[in-house]
Amino acid sequence: MSAKEKMMIKVIYFDEASATDFIYVLAGGMHTKKKEYIVTKTTKLASEVKAAIKKSISLFSIISAKLGIGANVNFSRDGNTIITKAIENTILTDYLEHTTSTGKPYIHVFSDCKPYPYPNSFAYFKMLTPYLKMTNGQIDVADGLSLNLSIMDETLDSCRGYYELMTEYDGETVVLRFNIKAFRNNYCIADLVKMNLDYHAIEVGMVNIGSLTMESEFGAKGEYEFNGFDLVDKTDKNFDLIKVYDVILAGVCR
């Protein structure tokens, strides 16, 4: 981050499950204790919701169920949304507190970035498929393999949870990987290419740029398969390996 501390004023993307795991790990794996803390804190934040939704069901039971530590319950859509937001915002607050203390060494912050899809990657097609539903055409992605564009979006939603985008930062090209279900306020992955955002991410490994294409995932011929020895000794080989980061939080900072 820059010397001048910035504040995130609008959240576009927040992977609360990954953030919660991150908080748990920093706390030494005390999952039960942390869950109880989140429930207690969220109950206090959402105390007015109980009166608003006028339900006889216990607010504690609702929150416990949303955190996966109690029995399933039914409640109104409005109540569900408010409770869920309260839980997410509690986790977000805790996460931000940790990124300025014990968690700071593990979080990479990419400031004012505008990522983009690698050509013919899954992310590239995911940005197009909502509009391609209006067509009935097909596209060839490999020898003997064609995809039906009109049903591709539905298929991608059911079989793929993460999408990779590229970005340049400090003279280095990296991959930012996104959980498609972590976008907030009706934003989607296609919106990221239109905005300059700050991204909080954790480095998870490296990838060969060529493996980002849809053809490579379907096993198209001509792709080199490398192993762990190649990662250590790649001086004599023309590998284009770049770092991969899983994004936890993205938003507008000022």
Image: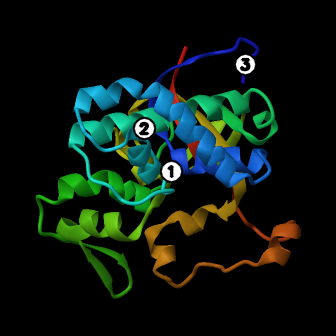
Which residue is at 47% across, 33% downward? 43
Q: Position of residue 184 (x, y in %)?
A: 38, 38
Q: Quadrant of the C terminus?
A: top right
Please give the residue where the numbered disc 1 appears in the rendered image: 178
Please give the residue where the numbered disc 3 appears in the rendered image: 2
Q: CA distance from mark 1 to mark 3?
A: 24 Å
Q: Is residue 185 visible?
A: no
**Marks 2 & 1, CB-CB < 8 Å contact:** yes
Of the pair 229 and 18, the residue shown nearer to us: 18
Q: CA distance from mark 2 to mark 1?
A: 11 Å
Q: Position of residue 107 (x, y in %)?
A: 72, 39
**Residue type, mark 3 in image:** Ser
Q: Quadrant of the N terminus?
A: top right
Q: CA distance from mark 3 to mark 2?
A: 22 Å
Which residue is at 57% across, 82% downward? 222
Mark 1, other Cα within 10 Å: few <14 / some 14–19 / many ≥20: many
- Which one is earlier in the sequence, the residue at label 1 or at label 3? 3
Q: Position of residue 238 (x, y in %)?
A: 75, 67
Which residue is at 71% across, 42% downward? 172
**Residue type, mark 1 in image:** Phe
Please give the residue where the numbered disc 2 appears in the rendered image: 192
Q: Is residue 128 left or right of residue 97?
A: left
